[in-house]
Amino acid sequence: MYQQLISVTFLIVTLGSQLINGQAASCHMRELDLCTATLLVFTQNPQGLQGTEAEIDRQCGYIREAQSCRQNYTRRCVTSLQREMVDFLAEGGKTLADEFCTPGTEIRADYRKHAKCLSEARATSKQCTKDLQRSLEEVSQTTWDNRVAMACCGYNRFQECSSQVISNRCGDSALDLSRKIIRLSSSRLPEILCQSYPYSSSKCSEILPPEGTEPLGARSNSVLSRIFSSYTGN
């Protein structure tokens, strides 16, 4: 489940580069990379996710920190109109995060029920993650005109791959929960921006690295990929 959360955050970071106000000399995309790193931290648990209250509270702390990081960046680095758009798209995710981080709510109970199986599914979907990481490396090298297409194709391919793993291992209820969790960080952003880029389309086939291509990891020019490798070992 949290691999999906990471993928959406990567998507926001990639597409967010198009919102930067060119006049804000102090702004740099590496700041958003660090926001993403905050979310990467809370996905790492050598014992796997167990769904305890203490674990959820700890995760909520990382979620809030990442949200604050993003808000601080957009407040300084984008125009007021762009900020309104980002806030509008993120509002649904914020509402769901508030629910997830409130004891006694339905989504929190569902998470406690499915957390262990979702964690096991994450451990068996490493190739999905590797394909995503390789796509991110390509995003950092492509032209501005192609970044949206590359990011969306990589995201949609990861979604299809990981969804199949979750559904087969944990069932449709767990898959529905994982899709809700996506909105914790992105709301409807992927749905709006990426619906025109199905991963099986000829466009995506042309621009994505073939499935199974090993990521460069620490040797990549992508800051996000190097951060990713430091936590996943890819």
Image (spheres, grey):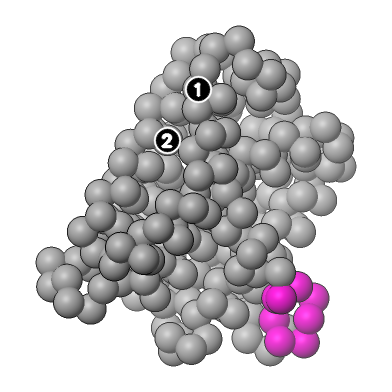
| Any part of residue 173 in sight | yes
Q: Is the residue marked by circle 2 packed among few (<14), some (14-19), or many (20+) residues within 10 Å?
A: many
Left or right of residue 64, residue 166 in this image: right
Return the mark for residue 63: 2
Of residues 136 and 234, the one drawn nearer to the viewer in this rendering: 136
Asked if the stretch drawn in magenta spans residue 199, the answer is yes
Q: Residue at x 52, y 86 (%)?
A: 146
Residue drawn at x 71%, y 69% is 195
Q: Earlier in the sequence, mark 1 or mark 2?
A: 2
Q: Residue furthest left?
A: 26
Q: Is residue 186 above or below residue 16?
A: above
Labels 1 and 2 touching (C-beta < 8 A): yes
Q: Residue 48 falls in which quadrant of the image?
A: top right
- Residue 153 shown left or right of residue 229 in the figure: right
Mark 2: secondary structure: helix
At 17% from the left and 71% from the top, the residue drawn is 24
Is residue 48 part of the magenta span, yes or no? no
In the displayed structure, 175 sits above or below 99; it is: below
Residue 113, position as x, y percentages in the image: 72, 19
> Percent position (x, y) of residue 127?
66, 58
Q: Which residue is mark 1?
A: 101
Could you tell me the amino acid type at mark 1?
Answer: Cys
**Residue extent of the magenta highlight:** 196-204
Mark 1 → mark 2, Cα distance in angstroms: 9 Å
Residue 120 percent across, percent down from the top left: 69, 33
Residue type at the position of mark 2: Ile
Could you say which is closer to the camera, residue 167 or residue 86? 86
